[in-house]
Image (cartoon, rainbow, N blue to C red):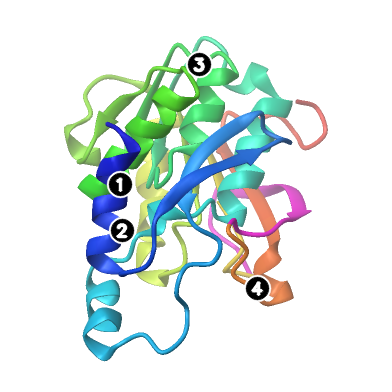
Amino acid sequence: MPSSDLNQIVQSLLPGARVEPFALPELSIELQLINADFPREQIPQEVAMRLMEEPFYWAFCWASGAVLARYLLDHPALVAGKRVMDFGSGSGVVAIAAAKAGAAEVVACDIDPAALIATETNAELNQVQLTLSGDFDRVEGELDLIVAADVLYDRANLPWLRRFQERAASVLIGDSRIRQFDFPGYRKLDEVDACTLPDLDESAEFRRVSIYGAGAWPRPGTV
């Protein structure tokens, strides 16, 4: 899908905003993201309400996504030749990194149709092929690895951690929201400072991204 489609979606939600290409040199990935000078102040109430109902998470490269993408590119053996699902794909940065690292198939899964348009657009921009899905439960066949970045902003999503373990041999989570992460079967593999793009001037605590692994996973430092 062309970036013009993404522009129409963004502008319908936030007048004065647009998408434009952002290069991520450390990842060798380029994404269509919201412009860095998008309107942030004095947003009319009706616009604010609409953004709450239809948040465009896919228009940002969140810190957790960037860190998880980097982790996959640094450790391609984790995905090479495997079937991978990126849950809550958003912009598609983690899915794209998995494809670039040599995954046999990457399923980008997101319930937001606009996120799937963004993921497809960014996949084409980076010349990788992804399988798109809007429903976790309708993805058939075995999965070797599920990756998910920044999906624990709502603690109501914690039960997904168990569902991931039940569905795939291994799971990788990138998160900057839960500081006391203690979920059965998961252990911390890495911790990195990063920021969201465009920069949202988030507090320092949300710039500290942890990566957790579950399942058939090597010990930290051995991958």
Q: x and y percent of residue 118 in the render?
A: 35, 41
Q: Which stretch did the figure color magenta?
A: 180-197
User: In the rendered view, does 146 fall on the left or right side of 172?
Assistant: left
Provide the secondary structure element on which disc 3 rests. loop
| Quadrant of the image containing the N terminus | top left
Q: Pick whichever of labels 3 and 4 is earlier in the sequence.
A: 3
Residue type, label 2: Val
Q: Which residue is drawn at 66% across and 28% down?
A: 28
Circle 2 SS class: helix
> Does any portion of residue 193 appear in the rendered image?
yes
Task: Kindly identify the residue that appears in the image at 22 percent across and 63 percent down.
Answer: 12
Locate residue 119, reporting x and y percent. Answer: 37, 36
Graded by Cα atoms within 10 Å as few (under 14), some (14 to 19) or many (20 or more), the crowding at tag 1 reads: many
Closest to the observer: 169 or 120?
A: 120
Q: Is residue 29 above or below residue 205?
A: above
- Dot 4 or dot 2: first in sequence order is 2
Q: First in sequence: mark 2 or mark 3?
A: 2
The reply to whether callout 3 and callout 4 are in contact (CB within 8 Å) is no
Of badges 3 and 1, nearer the viewer stands 1
The x and y percentages for residue 77 are: 66, 17
Q: Quadrant of residue 78?
A: top right
Q: Is tag 3's residue or tag 1's residue first in the polypeptide sequence?
A: 1
Kindly identify which residue carries mark 4.
201
Judge whether residue 167 can be spotted in this image: no
Instruction: Identify the amino acid type marked 1.
Output: Leu
Which residue is under mark 3? 103
Horizontally, is 172 left or right of 219 in the view?
Answer: left
The residue identified by callout 1 is 6
Q: Which residue lies furthest to the left in this view?
A: 138
Q: Nearer the viewer, mark 3 or mark 4?
A: 4
